[in-house]
Image (tube, rainbow, N blue to C red):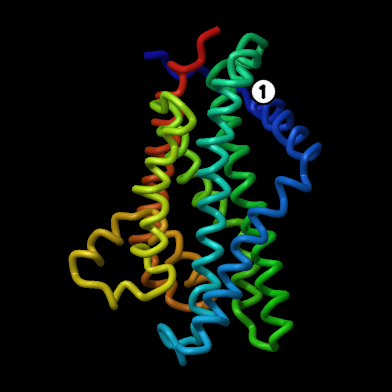
């Protein structure tokens, strides 16, 4: 297995800039899906289902799920970019190999993938935060605190890196793009239900609670919900430690494993 080479910040930025330039050219098709889908969740579940639920976790139902939807948007922004999009660049377009043949090393290419996927997570979090603030102002019901809104793009960095690393790990083993349906079906989609995003973990059986505490989205949602409410920070120790450890492990493993897929 190839070793991780020295990382050049300049080369990483150059590769990142290349991805950003490509995104800008097609920004209309890239911008709408990650923004519209979470808003539909907010409106459909928050105000639709919320009309039949007086409160959840001490707040209105729409206030309960708004921070969860932010965590979901962070996850999708990074995970989708480091799986489907990264695989296209690696396998079909041969972008990884082409860039690695320049002064940029293979390690620079992969670190740039992580940074770019995290950028997508941050942009999703920023857009959704603005949308949630707008919807809250429209219905005269603050859904997240202003201090929490300011912190959301910042907390999207470690959360995005964590999911980006997971995505690269999967990309390193994926034989074909269709194979990504499996982790999305068996890993991503179940987290919608089991990660305490739409219902408190306390409502689940003990076994389901223990499983949920092993899921990355659970801790991402706990962090975003705490920031949104501006209280409960003393209970975030485990979630912060989980995200920190998972980020270090998954990003290193993702780069290490994907190196073998860059053949110049």
Q: Residue at x 68, y 26 (%)?
A: 15
Q: Residue at x 23, y 62 (%)?
A: 210
Is 235 drawn above or below residue 212 in the view shown?
below
Is label 1 in a helix, a strand or a loop?
Answer: helix
Is 49 drawn above or below residue 209 in the view shown?
below
Q: How many numbered discs, if any?
A: 1
Q: Is residue 251 left or right of residue 19?
A: left
Q: Residue at x 38, y 58 (%)?
A: 191
Q: Residue at x 56, y 57 (%)?
A: 73
**Quadrant of image for the C terminus:** top right
Residue at image mark 1: 11
**Quadrant of image for the N terminus:** top left
Residue 141 at x, y percent in the picture: 64, 87
Q: Is residue 225 visible?
A: yes
Q: Nearer the viewer, residue 64 or 183?
A: 183
Residue 96 placement: quadrant: top right
């Amino acid at each position: 297995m190839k070793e991780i080479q020295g990382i050049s910040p300049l080369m990483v930025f150059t590769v990142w800039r290349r991805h950003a330039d490509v995104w800008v050219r097609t920004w209309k098709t890239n911008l709408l899906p990650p923004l519209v889908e979470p808003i539909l969740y907010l409106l459909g579940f928050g105000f639709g289902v919320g009309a039949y639920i007086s409160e959840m976790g001490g707040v209105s139902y729409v206030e309960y799920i708004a921070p969860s939807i932010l965590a979901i948007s962070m996850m999708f922004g990074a995970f989708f970019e480091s799986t489907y999009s990264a695989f296209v660049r690696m396998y079909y377009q041969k972008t990884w190999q082409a860039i690695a043949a320049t002064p940029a090393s293979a390690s620079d290419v992969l670190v740039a993938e992580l940074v770019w996927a995290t950028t997508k997570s941050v942009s999703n979090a920023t857009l959704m935060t603005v949308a949630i603030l707008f919807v809250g102002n429209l219905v005269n019901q603050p859904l997240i605190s202003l201090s929490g809104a300011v912190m959301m793009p910042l907390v999207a960095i470690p959360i995005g890196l964590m999911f980006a690393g997971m995505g690269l790990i999967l990309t390193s083993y994926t034989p074909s793009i269709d194979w990504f349906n499996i982790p999305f079906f068996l890993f991503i989609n179940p987290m919608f239900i089991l990660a305490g995003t739409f219902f408190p973990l306390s409502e689940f059986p003990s076994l389901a609670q223990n499983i949920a505490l092993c899921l990355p989205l659970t801790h991402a949602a706990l962090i975003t919900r705490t920031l949104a409410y501006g209280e409960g920070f003393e209970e975030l120790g485990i979630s912060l430690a989980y995200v920190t450890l998972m980020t270090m492990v998954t990003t290193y493993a993702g780069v290490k494993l994907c190196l073998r897929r860059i053949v110049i």
